[in-house]
Amino acid sequence: MTSLQVRGVCFSYSNGLVLHNVNLDIGSGEMVALIGPNGSGKTTLVKLISGVLQPRRGEILLDGYDLSSLDRKQIARNVAVVPQQFQIPFAFTVTDVVLLGRIPYLRAFAKESEADRRSVARVLEITGIRELARRRFDELSGGERQKVILAMALAQETRMLLLDEPTAHLDVAHQVEILELVKSLNRERDLTVIAAIHDLNLASLYFERLVLLKQGRILADGTPVQVLTENKIREAFSTSVDVTRHPLTGTPQVVLLPSDYSGHRDGGVPVIQADREV
Amino acid sequence: MPGKTKHTNRLGLILLLCGILLVSLLVASTFGAVTIPLSDIVKMVLKKLAVFDLPTAWSAAEETIIFQIRLPRVIGGALVGAALTTAGVLFQGLLRNPMADPYIIGTSAGAALGAAIAMILPISVSLIGFGLVPLAAFAGALATVFLVYSLARIGNKTPIISLLLAGFVISALLAAVMSFMMSLSDRLGLNLKVVYSFLVGHISVASWGQLAVIAPLVIGGIIGARFFALHLNAFSLGEEGAAYLGIEVERDKMAILVLGSLLTAAAVSISGLVGFVGLVVPHAVRLVLGPDHRLLLPAAALVGASFLVIADLLSRTLLAPVEIPVGVITAIIGAPFFIYLLRRTRKEYAL
């Protein structure tokens, strides 16, 4: 059971306040996306929840335990993180990299046990990269690397997975692939997922709950239908958008409105001036 | 089980490298002004260790040469090579920079300046078999690292980039002071030849007593480094990635810096500034064995030890009786090899 409570958390970098009195309760098995403009505090919140940053005020409870009372190893056995990108300067193979995920369970002079190797084989299977096992990490494509990093995080065998812009550098195929994978892990293994993600439509498609941040404050928190409204998005991003429905799933999809079209709207239905395109 | 085979292979490899080191030590002991047969050296050592009571087929002079001159020197060379290589692996791993060497955060400049100051001081000190110069080199190296680390510290963190920059700036400053002293060598009474010998590296072991101090430091340092092998693997992902894997980043960073600096300072105190070993050997061993520090650390230490023993042998014998500084030999072998590595891996490091 991994539940998370963020209670009155404030955080600032030396250049100014980044999070103001953030309160957030996330239950076990939820799949939550943190959305919002650049600099709204999504990544900072992920880093606070992973314990690499400490709140200036407030507290973060993991299953009721104050995160600041846990040591890094304990946190790493409970919370795994997939960052945007990893550069690895040395020639590690994919198996080597995924084995790094077992470090929270190894003592200093220990070798990986059979159990560790089985765990690695399992996550390579789950992430569908078994055939990459012997390849060198630095020779893989961006999408393949991201799957390796996801596999490494899964090898930590935590109940909570944090993702910081996991799809930021990927093409659409890999974006969908990574999020499908995360979604299935959430459903089938009851993994609690919290992801900072900037693509509103991907967030709407794959997440049940969206938390919209603006300038370090939570502006909205709810289902995609509740959060992705034209008013809230305009307030958060200062950009006019139109919200339509996904033709298959019915989830909200955000359509950008170029500024010269903003005067031509009628009852929420975008006026498509096809003749002007030609 | 593949895991099992790998484990056995690793142990076999380490034993093989131990064997190579032993052979290097023995071969290096036979050559010099007088060539003493390998078999006699083995017998001498066995007899000395009271393993066997063997008939004495060698002269007392030969025994003196082996025990008072050659063995201390070749063992000293092995310790210096192992220490510098281990420090190189530690710094390359921690800084995630395959170009880092043991001197990257200022140990060389600090040690050189410390040694130069000791050379002009009109006092003579001897502490546990060490003269003032090695002691001052040791102290200078550690003091510099401490200064660099303090300067690089921002709040309760020490970012790698500020560490590198502070190391660079302090090295430049100390090197300038050093040049200033050298330009005033006449007035200060600084013997440029001795300074030069320190700067290019020269293994000088005055007594077994020195080895008795250096050996525990180096061997302890290597075991300590091995303790951090997994942590160094985690550091390959960067500091944040390491933290996600449960590493206490700031604590481990400080421990690894202290270990690397102690190893470097220990080496510098008996050899001056031997270049390239700590840069090239870790790199070469990593290329062959892969980047897992659990294997890399002990393997590189053994290869580095053998490499420096052989380099020192060449330095004493190639132009005997003229001794080529060992730093020159390591650079002459090391530089072309490093260029070869750079070209081979050009794709990876291309900007």
Image (cartoon, coloured by chain):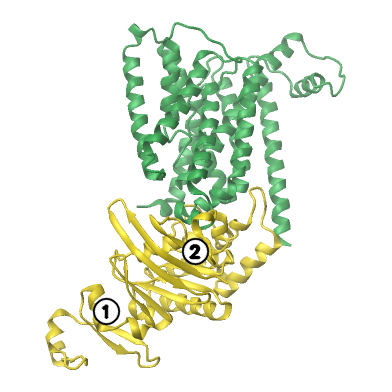
What residue is shown at x 12% (from left), y 86% (from top)?
A: A263
Label 1 sits on residue: A232
What residue is shown at x 27% (from left), y 52% (from top)?
A: A15
Reply above or below: B254 against B25. below
Q: Secondary structure under badge 1? A: helix
Give residue B189's quadrant in the image: top left
Q: Secondary structure under badge 2? A: strand
Chain at numbered mark 2: A
Reply above or below: A152 against A110. below
Q: Are marks 1 and 2 in contact (CB under 8 Å)?
A: no
Label 2 sits on residue: A61
Give residue B118's quadrant in the image: top left
Pointers 1 and 2 within a single chain: yes
The colour assigned to chain A within the rendered structure: yellow
What residue is shown at x 50% (from left), y 23% (from top)?
A: B138
In terms of depth relative to the viewer, which is nearer, A266 or A62? A62
Question: Around disc 2, counting alpha carbons within 10 Å, would you say few (fewer than 14), some (14 to 19), or many (20 or more)?
Answer: some
Q: Could you tell whether B222 is left or right of B93 in the image?
A: right
Q: Could you tell whether B6 is left or right of B258 in the image?
A: right
In terms of depth relative to the viewer, which is nearer, A132 or A269? A269
For badge 1, the amino acid type reads Lys
Checking the image for residue B268, the label placed there is none
Mark 1 vs mark 2: give the one in front.
2
**Residue B290, can we see it?**
yes
Q: Could you tell me how far apart the alpha carbons at marks 1 and 2 are, in whole angstroms?
A: 29 Å
Reply above or below: B288 against B77. below
**Residue A84, can we see it?**
no
Q: In which quarter of the image is the C terminus of chain A?
A: bottom left
Q: List x then y, in percent, for residue B254.
A: 49, 40
